[in-house]
Amino acid sequence: MESTVKELFERYERLFNQALGGDADMDAVASLYATDFIAASPAGVTSGKNDERLQKVMAQGYARYREIETQEMRIRHVRTSPIDEHHCIAHVAWTASYARKEAPDVTIDFDVHYLVQKLGGEAKVFGWVAGDEEALLKKHGIIQASSETA
């Protein structure tokens, strides 16, 4: 399963960078995901379906990454933790590169833990657990802290 999962994330990385370049293939992006998925972060837990809404949300996400001058998303390492013969957790270590107009470019390392299912020889993401991306971007000066109070 490990090689299939690594191939999945090689495709993921390639499609992500293609989208950053403004040439998003949303059907190919959607093919990385199972029919249903869950996502968890400090913002909460959500679930969804792999449908037109997912493609729209993903396209908006790529547009935001371009807006904040994300230049590249690169995988440093993929480690898998098997659950059973069809499931694993893929621990993916990413490096994001950002261009900044009035300061040196920045690279940020972060990890995302993906739930992966392999059926019929094909691996797909059915969930992920991520850290606080907004806080990380603010910490590195990629986005500004909001002056609003809760």
Image (cartoon, helix red, strand yellow):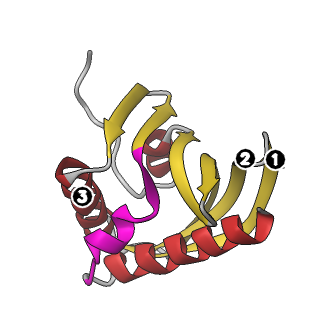
Please provide percent x and percent y for residue 37.
43, 40
Q: Is residue 146 left or right of residue 11?
A: left
Residue at the spot 42% in from the left edge and 77% down from the top edge: 15
Kind of residue indicated by mark 2:
Cys
Q: Is residue 22 visible?
A: yes
Q: Residue furthest top?
A: 150
Could you tell me which residue is drawn at 27 percent across and 70 percent down?
Answer: 26
Point out the image quarter for the C terminus.
top left
Q: Is residue 127 above or below residue 71?
A: above
Q: Position of residue 123 (x, y in %)?
A: 59, 61
Indicate left or right for 78 with 149 as reference: right
The reply to whether the magenta stretch includes residue 25 is yes
Q: Is residue 9 above or below residue 145?
A: below
Q: Which residues are magenta?
A: 23-35
Mark 2 and mark 3 lie on one chain; the one further toward the N terminus is: 3
Residue where numbered disc 2 is placed: 88
